[in-house]
């Protein structure tokens, strides 16, 4: 039997094509399986990674909760009070030690109520750390002048009661001088604002613009509250819009105590004896010149019974104000400070009538040297009717020459020195200046 080779070859080719197609299908299936296996492994790895990440997050959350729990145990609210400007109610002060106990208790209660309003999530065991800074001697005198304390009474028992009510309540005598309490308040504020345990600072100093410099850097902070006693000072009023505010009416007076006292003069004149060892100024030099007149300083009493005893300045025989020699660090520093165009009232007196509309710079607090130089700049500035005014920048230049222990007028040449008798920065006009009745001032 004969085979058709061509037919057999054709049939073989057909079978081979089918086999090749089958092999290709099998290879494609293997390739797809390999790809799917790789993707599955990647997904498994990703799932394992997420599991580890979730476990890590859970551990971090537990640690955070523990940390917050520990932090809550130490959390506190810092209450900073400028005792010179935020005055406790007279009935509390009059009641001595019991009044101090009540004042601390009422203040803590007011703080807790405020915290419940502004921070409802605060831990219930949050403590109140209260610091009151004041010039106790001056504050005592102010309470006496307002007939809250009698002449023989002091704030000692009130302060003792305040401090004993709670271990975290401190009424501190900051010493004399306006800046003493301000410096301590500023230091504690800057310390507490960066303390993670301090949940909130309640700042009780509404009537003093000097605190605005500290608060302005934290404008809008959710951790600061301002308490209003007396009306907010201008710059504090502007800042108050960015903070939580409250008023502890049952603790603090709504107005400042009057700082001047009314005195009834029994005689026409009151003689004030000069210091036994005066500084070497014109007053002491004038004593060395022969004179038959008294060397006491005399304040003329007003015609009617009582008046405010106001600060005084010395004037010469023509009624012109004469002051102490002006001090400054160096001429270069003074010239550099002049170029800065600083606002004298803001930096020297703590407030400016023009506020944000002032054409001169306010800015941060100056150093002690800069304050001295700025005082010099302010005092040498020419004022309208200057030597007859009784304010910060009003004075009379008095140039004299010392020759053989005597003061001589110098109009040309010679060694000059400026002679002054007072060195006080005044915030108000003075109505009753001291009169010098020793040797007369030389005529310039």
Image (spheres, rainbow, N blue to C red):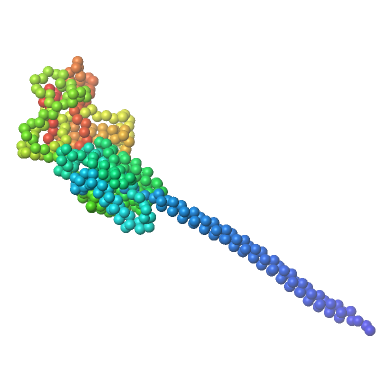
Residue 62 shown left or right of residue 414 in the figure: right
Do we see residue 232 in this rendering? Answer: no
| 362 shown above or below 325 | below
Q: Please state which of residues 328 and 108 is positioned toward the viewer in this rendering.
A: 108
Q: Residue at x 82, y 76 (%)?
A: 13
Q: Please state which of residues 319 and 286 is positioned toward the viewer in this rendering.
A: 286
Residue 315 shown left or right of residue 122 in the figure: left
| 56 shown above or below 261 | below
Percent position of residue 33, x then y = 69, 68
Q: Residue at x 28, y 38 (%)?
A: 174
Residue 70 shown left or right of residue 26 in the figure: left
| 427 shown above or below 38 | above
Q: Quadrant of residue 280?
A: top left
Percent position of residue 254, x then y = 21, 50
Count up the numbered dots.
0
Do we see residue 156 in this rendering? Answer: yes
Quadrant holding the N terminus: bottom right
Residue that extends furthest to the top in the rendered view of this protein: 404
Q: Quadrant of residue 386?
A: top left
Quadrant holding the C terminus: top left
| 133 shown above or below 418 | below
Residue that extends furthest to the bottom in the rendered view of this protein: 1
Residue 37 shown left or right of residue 340 in the figure: right
Percent position of residue 175, x then y = 27, 36
Q: Please state which of residues 170 and 83 is positioned toward the viewer in this rendering.
A: 170
Q: Residue at x 27, y 39 (%)?
A: 173
């Amino acid at each position: 039997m004969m085979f058709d080779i061509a037919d057999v070859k054709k049939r073989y080719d057909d079978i081979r094509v089918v086999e090749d197609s089958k092999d290709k299908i099998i290879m494609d299936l293997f390739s797809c399986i390999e790809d799917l296996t790789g993707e599955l492994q990647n997904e498994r790895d990703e799932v394992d990674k997420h599991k580890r990440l979730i476990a890590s997050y859970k551990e971090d959350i537990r640690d955070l909760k523990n940390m917050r729990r520990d932090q809550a145990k130490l959390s506190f609210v810092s209450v900073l009070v400028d005792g010179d400007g935020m005055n406790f109610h007279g009935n509390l002060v009059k009641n001595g030690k019991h009044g101090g106990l009540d004042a601390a208790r009422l203040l803590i209660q007011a703080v807790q109520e405020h915290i419940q309003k502004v921070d409802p999530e605060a831990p219930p065991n949050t403590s109140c750390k209260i610091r009151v800074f004041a010039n106790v001697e001056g504050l005592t005198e102010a309470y006496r002048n307002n007939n809250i304390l009698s002449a023989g009474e002091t704030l000692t028992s009130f302060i003792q009661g305040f401090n004993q009510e709670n271990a975290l309540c401190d009424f501190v005598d900051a010493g004399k001088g306006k800046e003493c309490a301000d410096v301590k308040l500023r230091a504690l504020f800057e310390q507490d604002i960066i303390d993670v345990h301090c949940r909130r600072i309640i700042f009780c100093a509404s009537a003093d613009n000097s605190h605005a410099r500290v608060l302005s850097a934290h404008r809008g902070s959710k951790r600061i509250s301002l308490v209003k006693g007396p009306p907010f000072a201008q710059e504090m009023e502007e800042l108050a819009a960015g903070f939580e505010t409250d008023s502890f009416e049952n603790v603090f007076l709504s107005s400042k105590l009057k700082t001047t006292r009314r005195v009834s003069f029994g005689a026409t004149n009151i003689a004030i004896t000069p210091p036994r060892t005066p500084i070497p100024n014109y007053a002491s030099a004038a004593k060395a010149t022969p004179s038959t007149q008294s060397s006491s300083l005399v304040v003329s009493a007003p015609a009617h019974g009582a008046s405010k005893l106001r600060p005084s300045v010395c004037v010469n025989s023509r009624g012109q104000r004469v002051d102490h020699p002006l001090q400054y660090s160096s001429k270069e520093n003074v010239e550099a400070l002049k170029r800065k165009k600083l606002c004298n009232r803001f930096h020297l007196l703590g407030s400016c009538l023009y506020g944000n509309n002032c054409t001169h710079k306010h800015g941060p607090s100056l150093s002690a040297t800069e304050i001295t130089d700025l005082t010099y700049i302010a005092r040498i500035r020419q004022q309208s009717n200057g030597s007859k005014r009784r304010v910060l920048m009003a004075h009379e230049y008095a140039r004299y020459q010392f020759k053989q222990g005597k003061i001589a007028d110098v109009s040309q040449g010679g060694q000059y020195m400026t002679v002054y008798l007072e060195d006080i920065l005044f915030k108000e006009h003075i109505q009753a200046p001291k009169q010098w009745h020793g040797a007369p001032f030389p005529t310039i």
